[in-house]
Amino acid sequence: MTREPALLALSDGSLFEGSAAGYRPPGGITQGEFVFNTALAGYQEIITDPSYAGQVIVFTYPHIGNYGVTPEDDEARRAFCQGVVVRDLSPVASNWRAQSGLEEFLIDQQIPAIIGVDTRRLTRHLRTHGALAGAFGVTDAPSVLAAAREARGTDDTDLVSQVSTRTPYEAGAGARHVVAFDFGIKTTMVEQLAQRFRVTVVPSHTSAAEVLALSPDGVMLSNGPGDPAALGELVDQIRQLLGVVPIFGICLGHQLLGLALGGRTFKLAFGHHGANHPVKDLASGKIEITAQNHNYALAAESLEGVEISHLNLNDGVVEGIASPARRCFSVQYHPEAGPGPHDARYLFERFEEMMER
């Protein structure tokens, strides 16, 4: 198959060569914040994770697409990432579950791609210089470089409103009722909750009063994209729920809970994106292998009067907090972890136990 040559440029002027694949955007150029993901599998779940809104995903594993895609593995109603970068896009989908190939899926989801890129060099560059805005496309180098310089990162940007559901919906039929804020909630997260509870998923802009009017036994703060410091109104609503109803936060929900408890957030150099991050539970000493996808984190020194429950063993980042007096806890990583690992799914039982107490 003959492909059109394409170029990838970062905002610092770095240039990479490749070939165009996937969806062809109007104007031929895609912009976004470039981050790399180290997972070896689960590319469909990664691409459809709403937490990637505003970002271009660089897959460090070189061979992507070999087992195709199936609607059963989608993590959202559609993909919200800006694009993907792949070294080798498999032309063959070999799996009994596959209903189409990855490139067909990218075209259907309107996700541009650039393939044949030296992703090892690109990943090393992002590790050294941090997540960078940039662009890729089929036009000439000066045009791609100009688009890269104009591209925006995710700082100070509310991306949650782009990915959240517009109307509430329900799932599950358990005895206890959980209201889940959709900040970009993954399908697997809803499924894990629905296995245990009756769940009402509500839009991100739902007020604390509206949540309490639903008589929940517990509240879930979901994952989502962007800068938590840009979501002051959501933090205010969460603050009104503290101590009133048990709260469990995941990823962005963890960051927003930390802000509501008086902490502050900061941006990591290149974030945590992958399925193999070791996390230590400080209470038990147990080490969990976790899936992660975030660029921001809670500053440990800002968490006065809050228990730090989990730490990342790679870099010491706060991975979990708890405030028993205010009946809340949260983790930075993904215990629902579709497709895996599943070491941390016990946290859903911990949430249930908190409601029982």
Image (cartoon, helix red, strand yellow):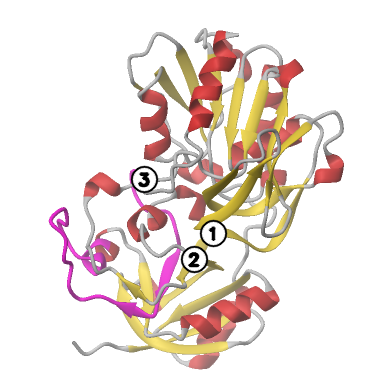
Compare marks 2 and 3 and give the one earlier in the sequence. Answer: 2
Up-down relation of residue 226 to residue 5 (above or below):
above
Spatial separation of the CA atoms under disc 2 and disc 3 = 18 Å
Span colored in magenta: 76-105
Amino acid carrying mark 2 in the image: Thr
Q: Secondary structure at mark 1?
A: strand
Q: Residue at x 39, y 77 (%)?
A: 62
Graded by Cα atoms within 10 Å as few (under 14), some (14 to 19) or many (20 or more), the crowding at tag 2 reads: some
Residue 79 picture location, percent across and down? 37, 53
Tag shown at residue 273:
1
Compare marks 3 and 1 and give the one earlier in the sequence. Answer: 3
Characterize the magenta stretch by its predominant secondary structure.
Answer: loop
Foreground residue, 74 or 228?
A: 74
Whether residue 121 can be seen here? yes
Foreground residue, 41 or 256?
A: 41
Answer with left or right where residue 81 lies relative to residue 222: left
Q: What residue did someone put label 2 on?
A: 38
Residue 330 picture location, percent across and down? 63, 33
Graded by Cα atoms within 10 Å as few (under 14), some (14 to 19) or many (20 or more), the crowding at tag 3 reads: many
Q: What residue did someone put label 3 on?
A: 75
